[in-house]
Image (tube, rainbow, N blue to C red):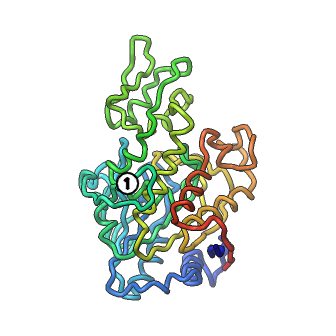
Amino acid sequence: MNKSKVYYTNLRTDYKNNLLDKLKNLVIKAGINDIDFKDKYIAIKIHFGEPGNLAYLRPNYSKVIVDLIKSQGGKVFLTDCNTLYVGGRKNALDHLDSAYTNGYNPFTTGCHIIIADGIKGTDEVYVPVDGGEYVKEAKIGQAIMDADIFISMSHFKGHESTGFGGALKNIGMGCGSRAGKMEMHNSGKPFVNENKCVGCRSCAKNCAHDAISFEKNKKAFIDHNKCVGCGRCIGSCNLDAIKSPSDESNDILNKKIAEYSKAVLQGRPNFHINFVIDVSPNCDCHRENDLAIIPDVGIFASFDPVALDMACVDACNKQSVIHGSYLDEKDHLSHDHFINTHPETNWEVCIDHSVKIGIGNKEYELIEV
């Protein structure tokens, strides 16, 4: 198989060439104009940012892509699906409020925002996954599947369950309806290590399903009959008192994300952009983003989301660790920043499974623009 082409631009600018100019030049060099946008509906999948988190992509970036598509006669919209957990994006009304609060609206982006799985997260399409080992029919937000062309714009960062979050995470997990997200997460449900739990109740505040109660000893208890396995409680515990039941669950999650990504991408033109900036240690679904773990790297673009993510993780692993960051405080047992940040994860599972089911190519040629 030939290597996939991944295009890259650094973040250096001057008065003739700002970052928005560089983004436009990057995607044009990467071939976005080879797509026939005229009179087509185009979904741009983006994360609008959980309120309180400041690492999300600025709306200015999306306007560059929106304007480029509209100049070629495309009918474009920005989109995301609702979340499982407590926060500002659990239903479409709150989700839109969060987007507007973070600067995403028709005036700043040049297009409308559509929450793809509807008001309650139940507007979904069952999409067969050819070759799926864990998912036979993915539950994808209706508006995303109504689009003729799919584009992803992803903030590249660490992730507590998948190692890192890039294009595949943004596509696979992000395009799943609320029921789809539940399906991806449900291979393992967390448990509480009572020796570490101090009864701070942070986990309960972040549980959307009232699955966490506190016993007489003031230790958290997770009712697996109510728990959906979303893992939000794991990320909210500062003491690492809540764990997944086995290492396998994160691997299965990664494979399901790959299979959901295939459901979204198969059978239609698609293009992908990763921003390796503000590389925070955890998912942007947190209401905080913490200090970046490495310096900013640049912007990457490709028709191949697998090669794109691979190029980004390779570029990240060449960077030094930022002093005082979460990663700086961890044991450096590996040469991989994302494994060191979250040792219980293995991001290569998603990459390898994506290659296996035919989404893209692990081998790439990096072309600097």
Q: Is residue 155 visible?
A: no
Q: Name the residue at 35% across, 72% down.
A: 77
The N terminus - image quarter? bottom right
Give residue 259's position: percent from left, percent from top. 45, 57
* Label 1, residues with CA under 10 Å away: few <14, some 14-19, many ≥20: some
Q: Name the residue at 36% across, 37% down.
A: 228
Q: Nearer the viewer, residue 358 or 168?
A: 358
Q: Nearer the viewer, residue 239 or 35?
A: 35
Amino acid type indicated by mark 1: Lys
Up/down of 27 relative to 319, above or below: below
To which residue does mark 1 refer?
Answer: 136
Q: Name the residue at 51% across, 31% down.
A: 245
Name the secondary structure under disc 1.
loop
The C terminus - image quarter? bottom right
Up/down of 143 relative to 52, above or below: below
Give residue 72's position: percent from left, percent from top. 40, 88
Q: Nearer the viewer, residue 285 or 108?
A: 285
